[in-house]
Image (tube, rainbow, N blue to C red):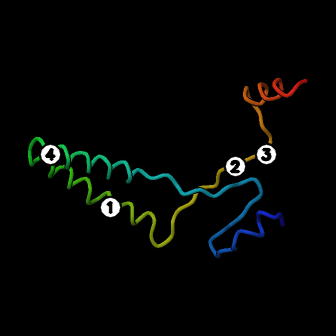
Amino acid sequence: MTEIDKNIPATPHAHRQAGVVQLPAPTVWPMVLATGLALVFTGMVTHWVIALLGVLCIVPAIVGWFLEVLPHEKHVGVPVSAAVSGPASREASLAVRP
């Protein structure tokens, strides 16, 4: 166990694999919520029907987002490696030379 692992409390939902980081799964609901809010504010300036359309986007977005997070948040495993590769690593190795 490394020093970093000692500082992280173990939880029953933490499934650790070497070289994999668990991140929250992507979801479309925040974008739908933002679109609904934008429509509500646009409707305040233009027409009430636009604001109503925004409310009709906001309600399912809030419900959908909460249903994806509760009772347990979905996670996606993202592979990671300690090796640095690509153009940035070549530039860094050239800059270190005396």
**Of the residues shown, which amino acid type is indicated by label 2?**
Pro
| Above-or-below relation of 29 to 97 | below
Q: Secondary structure at mark 2?
A: strand
What is the distance, in whole Å, between disc 2 and disc 1 at their CAs? Answer: 30 Å
**Of the residues shown, which amino acid type is indicated by label 3?**
Ala
Q: Could you classify mark 1 by the number of other residues whose Cα lies within 10 Å: few (under 14), some (14-19), or many (20 or more)?
A: some
For label 4, the residue is 43
Q: Secondary structure at mark 1?
A: helix
How far across and down, in percent of the image, does residue 30 sit? Answer: 38, 52
Mark with earlier residue (1, 3): 1
Q: Residue 75 is drawn in which quadrant?
A: bottom right
Q: Which mark is residue 79?
A: 2
Left or right: residue 10 compared with residue 46:
right
For label 1, the residue is 62
How far across and down, in percent of the image, does residue 40 sit? Answer: 19, 49
For label 3, the residue is 82
**Which of the pair 68/37 is nearer the observer?**
37
Left or right: residue 63 compared with residue 77:
left
Q: Residue 88 is drawn in which quadrant?
A: top right
What is the distance, in whole Å, between disc 4 and disc 1 at their CAs? Answer: 19 Å
Mark with earlier residue (4, 2): 4
Q: Could you classify mark 2 by the number of other residues whose Cα lies within 10 Å: few (under 14), some (14-19), or many (20 or more)?
A: few
What is the distance, in whole Å, between disc 3 and disc 4 at their CAs? Answer: 50 Å
Mark with earlier residue (3, 4): 4
Residue drawn at (65%, 69%), measured in percent from left and top?
Answer: 14
Q: Could you classify mark 4 by the number of other residues whose Cα lies within 10 Å: few (under 14), some (14-19), or many (20 or more)?
A: some
